[in-house]
Amino acid sequence: MREIPLPQFHEGLLKEEWYVQELEQHKILAAGNSWVQRYAKMGMREGIFSDMAGALGKIHDTVVDAARPNVIARQIIDVRSTEEALERFPLESESVAYIAAEASINRFSGARYSTVDINCSIEIKDSIALKKAFVEDAKWNAMDRQLEALGRSIAKIETDKIIALYAAIAAANLAGGAEIAGGAAVLSWSKLVEMWDAVEGADFEADCAFMHTKQMSQLFTATEFINSQYLPAGGTQLTKGLVGQALTMNLFKSSRCTNGTVHVVSKFPAGVMLIRRDITTEPWDDPRKQEVGIVATERIGYGILRSTAVARGTNFKTTF
């Protein structure tokens, strides 16, 4: 199985030439940034790092460390790194086969292709903005907590974007040609099987399902689900949204999903998220407003390639 590209830590990025160049520029900016100066001073006092480069590395790692458990989007879609602003994906739409008789004329007909262009034009960003007077008295724990909030915010928006991508698929284009009705009832094992079957019926292998926490709570009560989850505690990673496995699928829950809706996906053929620039951090300073802070950004693109590799169930009960 291909490893999911997660945001990289400072030490790993030091092997990348572009990051080393950016780090040198950030060190120059940091010299006049009171937030970073205060962060470095407090961090050196705590013995966490010893110089400005170490402080900038710690800033990046704190944001990334907070983001990694929350990047549920990267668990439910194929994720690839790219250095291109736009990538074109060819899709085989139709192939023609025939039975050739002996000594007959051979007819060759290749597959017909369509294309999907994915533009890495989406920049997600969030920032800490504080008055210089406030920064002068800031404590280490408070500053570290603010950085963690940046990472979680970036990850949540990324997850929102991918969930919305799946939600935007027209019902007629889904596996089975329609949504599966929940009938305002709780999510049952049979309904999960029905969605799984729709994807399998389209000749794709369903490998993940994602839903709101309410639907996951409903599924927890199904005897079939309980019997399928006799796993040691290490088999679940609730903090990463991964609850367990069922019917060849990893099951993910998130409050970012629409309550009452469940998606079952064969993620490799279904779509792709391209990462043009993963999570990076840099200091900023606005003398006019007497504000300083840190901005975290990432640049991505995404698109659906095979909508029939996705099944959707709707109108499930929204309360436990």
Image: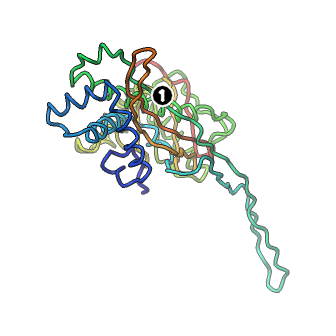
Q: Quadrant of residue 15?
A: bottom left
Q: Is residue 195 above or below residue 218?
A: below
As helix, strand or loop, the secondary structure at mark 1 comes to loop
- The image position of residue 166, as x and y in percent, is 57, 36
Q: Is residue 117 left or right of residue 127?
A: right
Q: Is residue 247 left or right of residue 199?
A: left
From the image, tell me which residue sits under label 1. Answer: 257
Q: Is residue 182 left or right of residue 64?
A: right
Q: Which residue is outermost to the bottom?
A: 103
- The image position of residue 159, as x and y in percent, is 47, 33
Q: Quadrant of residue 189?
A: top left
The scheme the figure's colours follow is rainbow
Amino acid under disc 1: Cys
Residue at horizontal 48%, vertical 21%? Answer: 317
**Can residue 241 be seen from the camera position used here?**
no
- Which one is in front, 229 or 275? 275
- Which one is in front, 274 or 37? 37
Residue at horizontal 38%, vertical 33%? Answer: 29
Residue at horizontal 53%, vertical 34%? Answer: 123
- The image position of residue 61, as x and y in percent, is 31, 39
**Can residue 77 be seen from the camera position used here?**
yes
- Which one is in front, 40 or 263? 40
Q: Quadrant of the C terminus?
A: top left
Total numbered labels placed on residues in the image? 1
- The image position of residue 272, as x and y in percent, is 55, 46
Residue at horizontal 21%, vertical 24%? Answer: 141
